[in-house]
Amino acid sequence: MKKVIGIPSNGPNLSDNISDHFGHCNYFVGIKINEDNSFEKLFGIKNNGHTGCMEPVIEMRDNEVTDMIVGGIGGRPFMGFLQFGIPMNQGVTGKSIEENIELYLKGKLTELKGSSCSGPMNH
């Protein structure tokens, strides 16, 4: 089965750090996991802002993302990913996309069971 990991990040490169907050990231990056657990960047989409919390969730689904690694995520997008059957993993902020993917492949990231950001800008 093809695996594509979606990651909100500060930049489009594997060396860029993951974003602390899903909706406020600079880029949404997609990483394809190969059968031998090697990986490659599939896409880097600039976050030009959005009018609703679900827009980036739908964009990830439309780009065939199967799993997410997030630094933080609000309740609405969290529920959106749940509805689409896309599991979320708690990423390690301050680490790069590449480092987080390696942790994911080693089973070192935990599945996110609820939203991790709150407040009026909860997305």
Image (cartoon, rainbow, N blue to C red):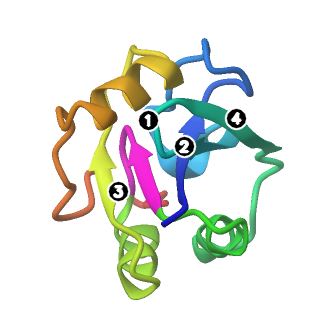
Q: Residue at x 54, y 43 (%)?
A: 34
Residue 100 placement: quadrant: top left
Q: Which residues are magenta?
A: 67-73
Residue where numbered disc 3 is placed: 119
For residue 8, which numbered disc appears in the image?
none
Q: Nearer the viewer, mark 3 or mark 4?
A: 4
From the viewer's side, name the closer residue of 58 and 117.
Answer: 58
Q: Nearer the viewer, mark 4 or mark 2?
A: 2
- Give the CA separation, mark 1 to mark 3: 37 Å
Report x, y in % for residue 90: 27, 43
- Give the CA separation, mark 3 to mark 4: 32 Å
- Give the CA separation, mark 2 to mark 3: 38 Å
Residue where numbered disc 4 is placed: 41
Give the residue type at disc 2. Asn
For the residues bearing labels 2 and 1, Cβ distance under 8 angstroms = yes
> Vertically, is 100 above or below 96?
below
For the residues bearing labels 1 and 4, Cβ distance under 8 angstroms = no
From the viewer's side, name the closer residue of 53 and 38.
Answer: 38
The local secondary structure at tag 2 comes to loop
Q: Nearer the viewer, mark 2 or mark 3?
A: 2
> Vertically, is 20 above or below 22?
above
Q: Residue at x 56, y 33 (%)?
A: 39
> Vertically, is 38 above or below 34?
above
